[in-house]
């Protein structure tokens, strides 16, 4: 039904579920900088806080605020950083 994920010594936590036949997670990240990898295309929507994102072919951080969505390509590594605890929704396709 639901699965709980925890990363980076508990600083990133998410709850996985299926919605409209697609996998998704909703979670929180403590202030800090993290690097993730993808195996599918991911649609990340910030719910609260501010998330800065650095994709592999970029040389500047892009900033996303509540209710803004960004797309992360399949099979890449990317970085995120937050100056405050930040909540998000991620849909996997």
Image (cartoon, rainbow, N blue to C red):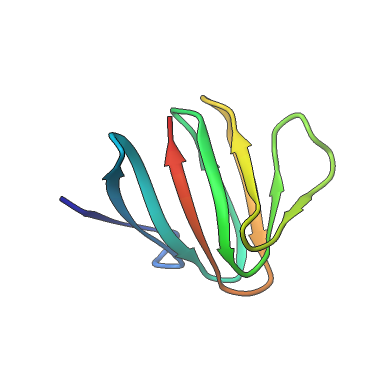
Furthest residue toward top: 75
Above or below residue 74? Residue 54 is below
> What is the x, y in percent for residue 64?
70, 55
Q: So how many labels did they put on this image?
A: 0
> What is the x, y in percent for residue 53?
69, 48
Asked if residue 53 lies left or right of residue 2, the reply is right
Between 50 and 76, the one nearer to me in the picture: 50
- The quadrant the C terminus occupies is top left
Residue shown at the point (65%, 53%) measured from the top left: 68
Asked if residue 36 lies left or right of residue 27, the reply is right
Between 89 and 55, the one nearer to me in the picture: 89
Residue shown at the point (45%, 28%) measured from the top left: 40
Residue shown at the point (50%, 29%) measured from the top left: 41
Furthest residue toward front: 20
Furthest residue toward bottom: 84
Furthest residue toward left: 1
Above or below residue 82? Residue 72 is above
Residue shown at the point (33%, 39%) measured from the top left: 23
Residue 73 position by quadrant? top right
């Amino acid at each position: 039904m639901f699965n709980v994920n925890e990363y980076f010594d508990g600083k990133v936590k998410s709850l996985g579920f299926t919605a409209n036949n697609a996998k998704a997670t909703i979670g929180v990240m403590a202030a800090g900088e993290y690097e993730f990898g993808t195996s599918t295309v991911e649609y990340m929507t910030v719910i609260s806080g501010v998330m800065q994102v650095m994709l592999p072919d970029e040389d500047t951080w892009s900033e996303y605020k509540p209710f803004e969505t960004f797309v992360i390509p399949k099979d890449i590594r990317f970085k995120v950083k937050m100056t405050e605890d930040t909540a998000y929704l991620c849909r996997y396709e």
